[in-house]
Image (cartoon, rainbow, N blue to C red):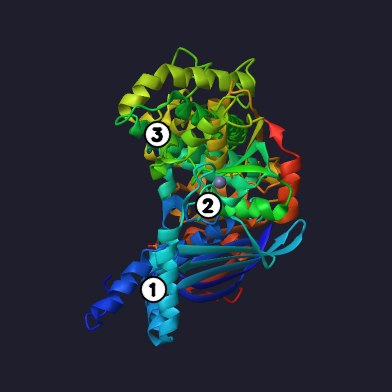
Amino acid sequence: MIIRHLSLTNVRLYARLELDLPGGLSIIQGDNAQGKTSLLEAIYYLATSHSPHGTLDRQIIRWGAEEEAPYPYAILKSDLQRRDGPHMLEIGIQRAEGNRMRKEIRIDHINKRGIDLVGQLAVVLFLPGDVDLVSGAPALRRDYLDDALSQVDAGYVRALEQYNRALTQRNALLRQAQERRIDPDELEVWNDQMVPAGVEVALRRREAVGQLTRLAAPVHRDLSNNREYLQIVYQPNFDPAAPPSTTYQLELDNTRPPTGMDSADLQTAFRAALAERQRDEMARGMTLVGPHRDDMRFIANGIDLGEYGSRGQQRTAVLALKLAEVSWMRDRIGDEPVLLLDEVLAELDPGRRQSLLMRIANSHQTIVTTTDINRFDQDFVRKAGIFTVNSGIVTKNAQG
Amino acid sequence: MPQINKTLPPSVTRLIDALSQLPGIGPKSASRLAYYLLRAPAEESVGLADALRDLKARTRFCSICQNITESNPCDVCTDPTRDRGVICVVEEPLDVTAVERSRGFTGLYHVLHGVISPMNGVGPDDLKVRELLGRVAAGPGEGTPVREVILATNPTLEGENTAAYIQRKLAGSGARVTRLARGLPVGGDLEYADEVTLSRALEGRQVM
Ligand SMILES: Nc1ncnc2c1ncn2[C@@H]1O[C@H](COP(=O)(O)OP(=O)(O)OP(=O)(O)O)[C@@H](O)[C@H]1O
Ligand SMILES: [Mg+2]
Ligand SMILES: [Zn+2]
């Protein structure tokens, strides 16, 4: 798919932007703090209806917009060319009374819910800070999986919503258990909501990680000059088939549930695990078992990169994952996602840079940002649309 | 309320404060309403004040179904043509109005006045659950035995959960426990369901 046109009103430093974008490659160049990241963030927002890394909606609205209107708003719009024809996505965010936020989503001019965005605009975004995915807190990796799956799988969005909501309620009940005697049935009915949703979430995550690792391994081998073999391993918090050892075996297929277990078996096992920890949960006032505690590890040649990888190795692993995500999304939705790369080249050595440029040279649409266009080789620049951004004004450079 | 001007007389600020306590009304709407009333003829604000006073003074919970009523028991509970063996359990008084509008139901009601929601500090004992269990458990001699309890809470997570909890508590009571069929949009409110959808949901209810 291709974003033909992007229109922003009051988004970050963009008071107003009307930008035609070509298919293939675009390079957005500009000095620091001119609006490069904000532009990619806006596109990501249109795909997911939220900013990357938990940025709040209110932060998106341009400062100063409140001086022009009592209830400041931001509007993001895009014209898409998809395999199934042209489409229009629009998201409006407005600060409402009592400091609340209102959000409206329109697809082809019709008001829709957040879940309806699944499969509309698919993007893969790589920000410089994404290296932390390998070494940072497990929550980062869960968010990554949630965001990736939420773009392609409406069933996942539903299961995750139900799980999170039931979990919040269950945790509140467990906190009350510290002050009053709770009826076991009260807890049991929340388990009935949480367990099936949790198993659904875990199964879909397992499948996704399995597919991603299979796609990422060859990319990574290439990026590392055949020196490293990458495995991305899903580590469910609740794993009835957990191997007793901590070493990673070469697993050819980890997309399926643990051997011989179907969804019903997993639910039974999840319930058993909850029952076992119940006393503990009541004492601590929170749910201690379930996919809200999942993790995912990056292993290269048997070594956990999160703990022992160099910064460069971690960066390469994330890059391989993101590039794998492009083909993964294509497999899942039958259309090519838009690839957004923020300042990635700056941090790669020449070999890896070359290998990356070759991979993206034939993509449907890739938008890369840079402070210095001279980092790209001439051939590459010749094929790309070049834009310059200056204080929230984007101009297309004359080709030549 | 930082925006409210210190030059306003206390009677105005008091009204603005009171109005902005209402759900969905912020300080700006509250001031707008207050100024409207200030300018409107006196009858209008007196009428509103009377209505507000009567709201609490004249109404109470029906001792049978817990609906809001001026006469106890309420008109539905005292209607001899209604089937006393069937109870339709709803979240709010407005849900009774919605089911009545569908004309698909001739039994009695039970209003819970909310749903179980630990994050809002609402447990079964904060609702009219015990009263419902008492109605169903009331033995022979105390009136018609309850044959069926229809759980018509909203199809939200909390509504489903409340229905499941009540169903557990009614197990072994002898009454058939049914749930509204999923004709209702998930996440939707009974109050907003149209009459056709609602009467279909009533017809297609299922044993839990
Ligand atoms: N809500 C907002 N309203 C107005 N300006 C904002 C808002 N949020 C962020 N900014 C400003 O927008 C500017 C551009 O930020 P952005 O991250 O897009 O720059 P960049 O071109 O990616 O810079 P760098 O090269 O340093 O990464 C920054 O100066 C930032 O402070
Ligand atoms: Mg930037
Ligand atoms: Zn009554």
**Same chain for the residues under marks 3 and 1 in the image:** no
The disc numbered 1 marks a residue on which chain?
B
The disc numbered 3 marks a residue on which chain?
A
Q: Name the residue under label 3.
A: A173
Vertical comparison of A263 with B42: above or below? above
Q: Where is residue B113 in the image (x, y as percent from the top left)?
A: 49, 46
Question: Where does the N terminus of chain A fall, quadrant-wise?
Answer: bottom right
Vertical comparison of A1 with B63: above or below? below
Mark 2 and 1 residues: CB-CB less than 8 Å, in contact? no
Amino acid tagged 2: Leu
Between the residue at mark 2 and the residue at mark 1, the CA separation in whole angstroms equals 44 Å
**Same chain for the residues under marks 3 and 2 in the image:** yes
Determine if residue B80 is in view. Answer: yes
Q: Position of residue A96 (x, y in %)?
A: 44, 68
Between the residue at mark 3 and the residue at mark 2, the CA separation in whole angstroms equals 38 Å
Q: What element carries label 2?
A: strand
Numbered marks: total:
3
Per the rendering, the mark at residue B30 is 1
- Residue sitting at 39 percent across and 73 percent down? B30
- Residue sitting at 30 percent across and 78 percent down? B12
The disc numbered 2 marks a residue on which chain?
A
Question: Where does the C terminus of chain A fall, quadrant-wise?
Answer: bottom right
Q: Position of residue A168 (x, y in %)?
A: 43, 39
Q: Which mark lies nearer to you, 3 or 2?
A: 3
A47 vs A83, nearest the viewer: A47
Amino acid tagged 1: Ala
Q: Where is residue B154 in the image (x, y as percent from the top left)?
A: 59, 45
Task: Choose top left, top right, bottom left or bottom right for residue B192.
Answer: bottom right
